[in-house]
Amino acid sequence: MKKYLYILFAFIVLSSCSEYQQTLKATDIGPKFKLGEQLYNEGEFSKANRLFSQIVPSYRGKPQAEKLMFMYAQTQYGMRDYFASSYQFERFADSYPKSEKLEEASFLSAKSYYMRSPVFSKDQTETKVAIEKLQLFINLFPKSEYLAEASSFIQELDGKLERKAFEIAKQYNTISDYKASIKSFDNFLFQFPGSSLREDAMYYRFDSSFNLAIRSIERKKEERLESADRYYKDLMTGFSETQYLDRAGKMHEEIVEELKNYSTKS
């Protein structure tokens, strides 16, 4: 019995493949639309996409064009070709501003940009674009059923930018470019006031300021020690029980001792 079932299954598969190949090679656009829609509904996005790509130009201006263009964009999204899907969904929204699929298409376009965002360690240009697209969607559809999802995407993408900015500033500290590190952490704390990395940023800013001061030439040392002292006090004001308490405390003791020399001289 199993043998016959296997044979039947193989026959169905081969017949299906044969139908697809024949339709793909045919010149009649009607069967391509019909089979493409069937494959689309079955989740066979790659096959459906090949058929749709052949007939899209022929359906421009026809009643079926709206449905076809939406399915075409969906196949690209289903294939994870997010560069193509973001473009095609935008194109659909521009072409059919009164479509009942407008909100969904606009969201999926913005989500496609979100899917294009790389890990935080890479260039974040795509991330910034994705945030803009998602915010535009929220502005256009403030009562959308996709609002919560779009907002969560923006929060996640903001987190990438935050992490990227922090790691750049910390890298300056690591390579002993303390001036750049201080400036970068200043910018980070201004741009991300509610960051979960705020404590770390304030500590490494202080650490950079301390190292810059200790290694300074004499005529700049007092001013930089005073600046480091302020950064220490900022850290302690914000995080009195900071995880860096011991290390920061020892550095501050050294700052205080160094500053005593200048008070004695004056």
Image (cartoon, helix red, strand yellow):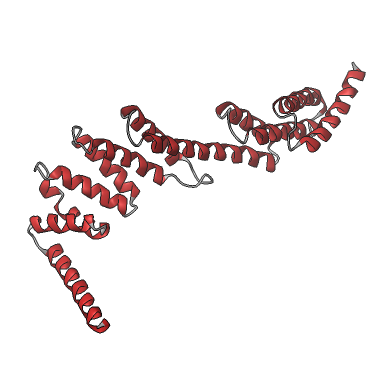
Q: Locate the C terminus and report the quarter of the image it occupies.
A: top right
Query: Looking at this view, is 246 or 12 the one in front?
Result: 12
User: Which percent across, then down, holds residue 75?
Assistant: 26, 52
Residue 175 visible in image: no
Can you say whether 260 is above or below 69 in the image?
above
Residue 204 visible in image: yes
Query: Looking at this view, is 76 or 259 the one in front?
Result: 76
Can you say whether 81 is above or below 256 in the image?
below
> Which residue lies most toward the right here?
264
All told, the count of numbered labels is 0
Can you say whether 108 is above or below 18 in the image?
above
Q: Locate the N terminus and report the quarter of the image it occupies.
A: bottom left
Q: Is residue 242 left or right of residue 96?
A: right
Q: Residue at x 59, y 31 (%)?
A: 188
> Which residue lies most toward the front here?
1
Quarter occupied by residue 54: bottom left
Quarter occupied by residue 15: bottom left
User: Which percent across, then down, holds residue 48?
Assistant: 21, 57
User: Which percent across, then down, holds residue 21?
Assistant: 16, 67
Q: Residue at x 22, y 45 (%)?
A: 70
Q: Is residue 32 left or right of residue 180?
A: left
Q: Residue at x 32, y 32 (%)?
A: 144
Quarter occupied by residue 47: bottom left
> Which residue lies most toward the top here?
266
Q: Is residue 222 left or right of residue 150?
A: right
Q: Is residue 32 left or right of residue 74?
A: left
Can you say whether 184 is above or below 57 in the image?
above
User: Which percent across, then down, holds residue 207?
Assistant: 74, 35
Query: Looking at this view, is 144 or 133 the one in front?
Result: 144
